[in-house]
Amino acid sequence: MLTSLYIKNYALIDELNVQFNNGLTIITGETGAGKSILLGGLSLVLGKRADLSQVKNKDEKCIIEASFDIANYDLKNRFLDLDLDYDVQTIIRREILPSGKSRAFVNDTPATLDSLSLLSSSLIDIHSQHQTQQLIENEYQFKVIDALADNKVLLNDYNTHLQEYKGKQKTLTALKEDKAEMIKEYDYNLFLLNELSDVKLESIRLEDLESQYEQLNNVEIIGEKLANAKAILTLDDQGVIDQLNTLKQELNKISSFGKAYEALAERIASVHIELDDVLLELDDLEEGLSNDPQELEHISDQLQIINNLFHKHAVTQIEDLISIKNELASKVSNTENLDDTIKKTEEDLLKLEGNLNKIALDISKKRKAVVPTLTQKLEGMLSELGMPNAKFKFQLTESDSFLSNGKDNLQLLFMANKGSNYNELKKSASGGELSRIMLAIKAILSEYIQLPSIMFDEIDTGVSGEISNKMGDIMKQMSGKMQVFTITHLPQIAAKGNSHFKVFKSDKNNSTHTDLKRLDEEERIVEIAQMLGGVNITESAVAHAKQLLN
């Protein structure tokens, strides 16, 4: 419930701070006194866009702050979804700065206007002529039926399945599109994969292959140079080894004459041993030489294939070709397995479709079950509101597709007078009739669900007498379960309030100001007497006012 409203520097309001109670709160005032200003300020708190022209003193900021007791509203998840701090005593504040910029806060946490709008729908319902038009909208009509049918849990379950169903549909569409594209590429990808697989890349060491090619391609030169090297080492008398033997013998003769000579002799002996090993290796290499033109051609072909693959795929490493081969293998495999994936997705869709159909059927059954009750309640209440011949038809038919709230199409038909034909509500109900229908619907809804605080903005326009009295009774009855405000010009309704506020204008310092005052019992008598008989209050008007209040 709305517990307080603070307005500063807005339109004709200098500063206003008012506290509200539960029950039925009446707001009255002469035409032009500023009731619309009060609603305008409250609308800003609820997310309406601000306008600098609404600021009274352009040099100071405008502040509108509303406090709500939301302990019984079950809104913790809503606050969580909007990333706002939850408090059972929630304060919403709007500020319009002299620069024209606007700021919004929920429990001192900065908030966007979208967040305010989403939150405010759960806090207070300002019922205006514009909102009455909701009656002709299918979404609102379903909301009423589903409230009576207690379809909240089923609808949540349906929406969960519907989101999953739509997700699967998108997945299936994407898979089929992928399949069409992948089929176009499949043959080429398979060709490239086979080309890479034939080379057996994992077993190739490119450095070894290039070394074998160089050896086979230069076998004659290698043989010649190996023979020359051996000759240099082994040539009689002049060979390196013979010369080294002579050197070793000479140094051995003086090795016992000192450490230095001994070390030198050892070094020469070491070199001799090393050259013997070199000679043995030269022999092995010479014996291992093979002049094999076929092997040379084979290795040359392999290297040519690899170089062609390097060029084709714009890489320089065997590892890169292996990565490309693996990627191609994955694409080919995905294409070959895509039919299985598509089939599995289609099976999932069929299962979800079955679940959705079952839930939608349960929702529809519950809707159809409550339509007679809703019709009876509506027609009965409207009869008391001066529409004794009002008749409704709620026509529910099954849709071929899944809608946002089930599979029902709804057509609400209305007949205001005997002998006339049923027609769409928007074509057959006047503005005044729509207002009364909306009041009746709100009253019925309040019996089934916890509605937020509601403010009726002159819903009694165009009615009087006993009908206005009944409208007051309905609002009074509603206020037993929720906080109800009504801006009214009818004394019969004004007298039914638990609290009564008056909006009035005054002139101070050549400036007009709007203010709001809570009336005590005597002031209420005077206000209602004036509503009955005008500014000049008569004794009969006062007596009538007291009678209404009692």
Image (spheres, rainbow, N blue to C red):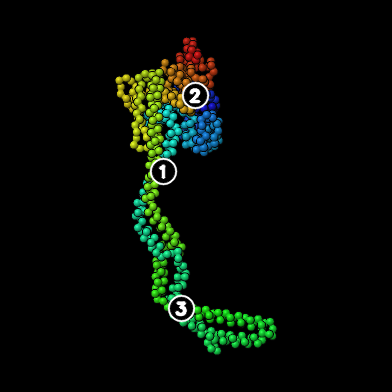
Q: Which residue type does callout 3 highlight?
A: Leu
Residue 424 versus residue 186 in the image, above or below: above
Report how far apart the C-alphas of labels 3 and 1 lie in the structure: 69 Å
Residue 70 position, x and y percent, is 53, 30
The reply to whether dot 2 and dot 1 touch (C-beta < 8 Å) is: no
**Nearer to us: label 3 or label 1:** 3
Residue 429 position, x and y percent, is 35, 24
Frontmost residue, 59 versus 401: 401
Q: Which residue type does callout 2 highlight?
A: Lys
Residue 387 position, x and y percent, is 37, 19
Residue 5 versus residue 216 in the image, above or below: above
- Picture disc at residue 167: 1
**Nearer to us: label 2 or label 3:** 3
**Nearer to us: label 2 or label 1:** 1
Residue at far right of view:
258
Identify the residue at image location x=54%, y=27%.
3
- Picture disc at residue 481: 2
The reply to whether dot 3 and dot 1 touch (C-beta < 8 Å) is: no
Estimate how packed mark 3 is, as few (under 14), some (14 to 19) or many (20 or more) residues with alpha carbons within 10 Å. Answer: some
Identify the residue at image location x=42%, y=64%.
200
Q: Earlier in the sequence, mark 2 or mark 3?
A: 3
Under tag 1, what secondary structure? Answer: helix
Q: In which quarter of the image is residue 398?
A: top left
The reply to whether dot 2 and dot 3 touch (C-beta < 8 Å) is: no
Under tag 2, what secondary structure? Answer: loop
Estimate how packed mark 1 is, as few (under 14), some (14 to 19) or many (20 or more) residues with alpha carbons within 10 Å. Answer: few
Identify the residue at image location x=43%, y=18%.
470
Report how far apart the C-alphas of labels 2 and 1 lie in the structure: 41 Å
Residue 130 shows up from this direction? no
- Picture disc at residue 289: 3
Q: Which residue type does callout 1 highlight?
A: Gly
Residue at far bottom of view:
237
